[in-house]
Amino acid sequence: QTNDPFVVDIPKIELHVHIEGTMTPELRWKLSQKNKIPLTCGADKIALTSLEETQKAYTCIRGRIGAASAEASKSFTFFQIYYEGFDLLQSEEDYYDLAMRYFERAAKLNVRYCEPFFDPQGHTRRGISMEVIMKGFQKAQIEAERELNVKSQWIMCFLRDMSPESATEQYEAALPYKDMIVGIGLDSDELDRPPKLFDEVFRRAREDGFRRTSHCDFNQKDTHEHIRQVAESLGGPGTERIDHGLNAADQDDLMNMIKEKGIGMTICPCAYIRHAPESEVFVRIRKLFDAGIKITIASDDPAYMEDNWVLHNLYMVRDKCKFTDQEMVRLQRNAIEICWASDDEKAALS
Ligand code: HPA
Ligand code: ZN
């Protein structure tokens, strides 16, 4: 059901959305025109020469990544398309635009507070300065709070397919912007990249007062071991949240540890059903929720995930996990409890 007024009206908090994953075809086209960067589609690099073609390419991307055809998904992966979008971002104004378009969408969906991720290494490695990125984001953030009543704090993610040394370098480059950044995370391709590789920089971030989270994507190789490292010991005591981590539902000892440590989990159902049967997804979400683990629902990379924003992700669990009105409210309360707003902010959100 996709117009359930209860779900539409409920005030929302979004804790797992990659700002770069909110780049719509419209913005991609606009930036390509503005910055004179030609757009192409797929491994065969077919030129895109209009907004309509760009929109169609997104449909084809959406149809193909992680989709039924192994042949098609070989020709381009999610990460290729995601990082190609980075190249279009050049100026402070571009970063402002990216963030502002998301905040506007969030306001329409009744999102009152969010903690978007950003991947600075994907920008600084192209020669973009932290100043350009952060000034653009900050302008949007201030305007969103003032004009749209959407509050936000940023989470800086390290790319785990880059080196721990690169993460440390990025960490130091971000320290002048500490006031804007509430936490650090770990994302990108996790194949053979166990979280413990980044233990040192997470330890440092903890000592410096940053909150910590890490991705453990659904059904990845070694996922149970990755979840264990993140929950048990990353940066010393483990992180305060896990992004995805849905496979924790497979093992009672992982669930118990997450529950006992009060670790929050950000769950993005529309991301999983692109490459797993629904039967494997919603049973696990229900199981974590029923175990009393603090899960919250979010959108991940909505522009690349069939255009499914947080509202649609909430509809999905409402429908497939059969969450009652009360349980939907519980999901939002979980989000307030596990978010990194100040106590005063949390009280205002309650
Ligand atoms: N997984 C891991 N890293 C990411 C993703 C994702 O889905 N989106 C953006 N960075
Ligand atoms: Zn994510």
Image (tube, rainbow, N blue to C red):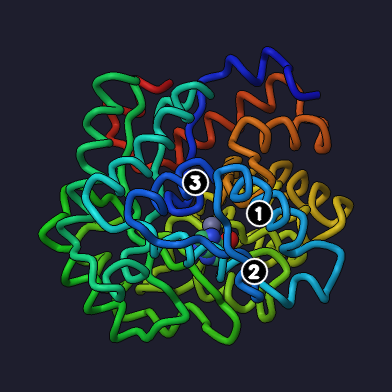
Q: Secondary structure at mark 2?
A: loop
In terms of sequence position, does the residue under pointer 1 or pointer 3 come before the other? 3
Toward which corner of the image does residue 324 lie, by quadrant? top right
Q: Which residue is mark 3?
A: 22
For label 1, the SS is helix
Residue 215 in view in this figure? no
Q: CA distance from mark 2 to mark 1?
A: 9 Å
- Whether residues under marks 2 and 1 lie with C-beta atoms below 8 angstroms apart, the answer is yes
Q: Quadrant of residue 78?
A: bottom right
Total of numbered circles in the picture? 3
Q: Quadrant of the C terminus?
A: top left
* Mark with earlier residue (2, 3): 3
Residue 68, horizontal then vertical, whole percent: 86, 64
Give the camera-side residue of 165 and 85. Answer: 85
The amino acid type of the residue labelled 3 equals Thr
Tell me where residue 325 sits by quadrant: top right
Q: CA distance from mark 1 to mark 3?
A: 16 Å
Residue 280 appears in the picture as rendered: yes
| Mark 2, residue position | 42
Indicate whether 89 appears above or below 7.
below
- For residue 57, which numbered disc appears in the image? 1
